[in-house]
Image: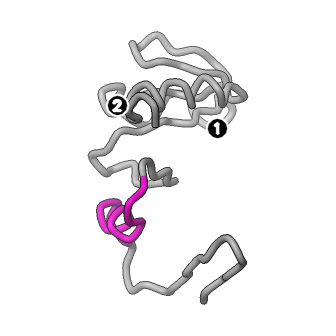
Amino acid sequence: MIISSPAKVALISRVDQEKTLDQVAAMAGDVDIIFTEGYKRENKPKIEVFRSGVYDEILCKPSELIAIASDRQFDNGVPCFDLDDASGLIDLIERLYLKPGV
């Protein structure tokens, strides 16, 4: 399926098996940042969204995380942001991954 508007085009297609994160990134083309959901087992930087009513502890190893967005604080050396602190997460992502002036 292709969805098109004057400003955007999106392609949705069936696949026989899940694409790896590297395959998804290759399909994205020349972009600065790709956000995905899932791919916990991929060896890529992650932001874990943690809700205390769902799990007791974070799922990823702290060494895999660049940040945690949560309704509670963690003392594991990983920057932790409130679930509603989108600007804090954006600032961190810009500092870590975008070149100055971009």
Q: Three-letter amino acid code at disc 2?
A: Lys
Residue at image coords 64%, 32%: 51
Which region of the structure is painted magenta? 19-31
Task: Indicate yes or no whether the magenta region holds residue 24.
Answer: yes
Callout 2 environment at 10 Å: few (<14), some (14 to 19), or many (20+)?
A: few
Q: Is 25 on the left-hand or right-hand side of 43? A: right
Q: Which mark is residue 54?
A: 1
- Mark 1 residue element: loop
Identify the residue position indicated by label 2 in the image: 61
Residue at image coords 52%, 27%: 68
Nearer the observer, 40 or 45: 45
| Percent x, y of residue 83 | 68, 29
Nearer the observer, 42 or 91: 91
Q: How many marks?
A: 2
Residue at image coords 33%, 50%: 41
Nearer the observer, 31 or 101: 101
- Mark 2 residue element: loop
Q: Which mark is residue 37?
A: none
Q: Is 7 on the left-hand or right-hand side of 30? A: right
Q: Toward which corner of the image does residue 54 lie, by quadrant?
A: top right
Relative to 79, say whether 8 is above or below: below
Q: Toward which corner of the image does residue 52 lie, by quadrant?
A: top right
Task: Indicate yes or no whether the magenta region holds residue 30.
Answer: yes
Relative to 50, say whether 42 is above or below: below
Question: What is the C-alpha distance between the residues marked 1 and 2?
Answer: 18 Å
Callout 1 environment at 10 Å: few (<14), some (14 to 19), or many (20+)?
A: few
| Percent x, y of residue 57 | 50, 28
